[in-house]
Amino acid sequence: MAAASVMDVASIDLVARAMDMASIELVASNLGIDLSTVNLDSIVLPPGEDFGIPSDDEEILQREEPPEFEAGFGNVIIVDNLPVVPQEKFDKLEGVIRKIYSQIGTIREGGLWMPKDPQTEKTLGYCFIEYNTPQEAELAKEKTHGYKLDRAHVFTVNLFDDFDRFMRVPDEWTPAEIKPYTPGENLQQWLTDEKARDQFVICAASETEVMWNDPRQLKPELVYRRTFWTESFVQWSPLGTYLATVHRQGAAVWGGANTFNRLMRYAHPQVKFIDFSPGEKFLVTCSDHEPNNPRDSHRVVLNIFDVRTGKVMRDFKGNADEFSAGGAGGVAGVSWPVFRWGGGKEDKYFARIGKNVISVYETETFTLIDKKSLKVDNVVDFSWSPTDPILAYFVPEIGNQPAKVSLVQIPGKEELRQKNFYNIGDCKMYWQSNGEYLAAKVDRYTKTKKSTYPGFELFRIKERDIPSEALELENKNDKILAFAWEPKGHRFAVIHGDNPRPDVSFYSMKTGRVSKLTTLKGKQANALFWSPAGRFIILAGLKGFNGQLEFYNVDELETMSTNEHFMATDIEWDPTGRYVATSVTSVHEMENGFNMWSFHGKLLYRLPRDHFIQFLWRPRPPSLLTVEKEEEIAKNLKKYSKKYEAEDQDASLLLSEQDREKRKQLLEEWEGWVKKWKRMHEEEKAIRQMLRDGEASDEEEVYEAKEVEVEEVVEVTEEVLPYEFDQE
């Protein structure tokens, strides 16, 4: 039998060779080549499996990261400790299991299998469940491991792939290998820059670049550049530790001062939005998916990840309608951000608005506080204090019930303050950055209820019983175009009136009562941008105003400078308040790029970029200095400034020296160019003289100057003179 098999293999090999030779002869005859004259043994093929011919897939194989393929049974889980039931109870148990696990993800068709004992026809106490993705299987394991079906049946859940790992466990114990500690990269190293510079990131076309802002050199310095780093946008974390990128498979975060290594990936297919918690502990991702049935609405999936570990802490799924209440619109009608974070930088609480409820969750367990939502009939909007776990919400006027703004303390859900309003149509709430003040802009109806006029209710959050006072504009018919609190300060600015030249007013809360500081009449502005350090503000005219910029000093109540960045769409102050960037994004086809300005409005440099998408400063974490230390530095600023003035002077001298060297080089190039052409002129003099039959026309004395008088008719007038017949 073995000999016959060997003969079969040999026959197949001979047939294959004969077929190859026949195909070679056919090709040779088509090309007109006589194989009898060719010594086939002399032909030497190039080395290598591909014979020196690169594959079409060579580019894929040379990628920085090889493509990942799904392998194994990562999307299958095994649920143990199920009840052992006879045949007649099989369907009931299967229905219970399917109901529990279909809430976590989509079970594939035929993906639930409970083995049975062939002799007793009873189940064996475990089952296999197959999901569409490994992420759903992993989530099902996390959610249901330890699930208590009843007193006697507590689920034990494992991934199918884990059994390979369990089987590789040796029978004899051996101590674990202790690897030497290797410190990771310092993710705050960029804060130690000797020049105290700030970083920013820009996206243009397929390029993403991180740069130092270097105003002394009047240009940015490149830190890191990468092509196709993101598929839509990038986003810094609130404290500047991470840079997040968005991809079809999910999101990723990168860190460092210069290298920007990838630190973690977060699997979430078709992700559209991302949002960090204020303290950078958590990352929220959101995606929407087209329904299979046209009658159904979009399905929305939200995941909350632990930033450092990449673990899914909580997921939310549902129709788009469930996530559309409150806030600004997003994809498929979803209001983004869906979750709003409270409790300051500790990331203790987050909340979302629903129909007649505000659901407040705690991050310790990722469950509702007191296991129930805060019931608020007809609530339409809410916001958190930036520093304290205080929640403010607005309920509109319905029937005989007045509208109200309420302040609630979390986690106790104790109402700290409530203010009722009558005859109002809308309300918008603005928190001051330190959480000291809250402004509620309300639109009140006139007596005829055919129109509204604006006003403000201003709350002093840190004072006893949270007092409030009303503020109305001198001209009640003025529209409010913009409102902005001074960061860490007591002042606020309002743009009011009608386009194209509204007024800008400044107010103060410092004296115990709100007081107006000044009103600037007829400004080309529709947006306000305070410096992060306060004191200075930019009155900007974006969109229809074509980029008008007025740099204003609120302390002195005077304009420092007026400039223009034509078609500017965005304005970003750096974290220190020393510099500000204005940019034109690709919503306009021309003038794309950004300009860098000083705080008082001096243009420092420009950087044009085609298809410009984003400009984002890298945020700085809060200062570690105490308030007393900061005040001491402010008092002795002249002592510290001498050092930096000397450095600025050195940099200025270096720039001047560089400019002189550049001018000297240009002058030398010009003089060399002139000498070259003079030499060529002399060399070609004989040729020119020959072409002119011996006449030399280069010397000036061969020319004769003559004065020529030219008569020109300046004006012609026509006059009729009387004629007398008797004149002799």
Image (spheres, rainbow, N blue to C red):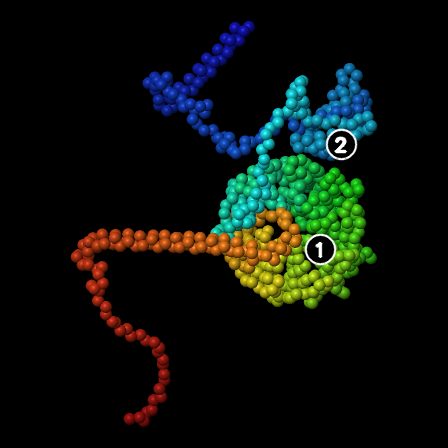
Query: In the image, is 669 to the left or to the right of 409?
Result: left
- Vertically, is 564 above or below 230? below
* Viewer can see residue 388: yes
Q: Nearer the viewer, mark 2 or mark 1?
A: 1
Query: Please, which residue is most extreme toward the left here?
Result: 694
Q: Amino acid at mark 2?
A: Ile
Measure how far apart labels 2 and 1 are at the Cα level.
47 Å
The residue carrying mark 2 is 100
Say few, some or many: other residues with alpha carbon within 10 Å of mark 1 (under 14 / 14 to 19 / 20 or more): some
- Vertically, is 120 above or below 488? above
Q: Mark 1 or mark 2, which is nearer the start of the sequence?
A: 2
Q: Amino acid at mark 1?
A: Glu
Q: Residue at x 51, y 42 (%)?
A: 225
Residue closest to the eye, 293 or 10: 10
User: Element at badge 1?
Assistant: loop
Task: Say the numbered circle drawn on residue 436.
Answer: 1
Q: Residue at x 19, y 56 (%)?
A: 689
* Viewer can see residue 424: no
Q: Quadrant of the N terminus?
A: top right
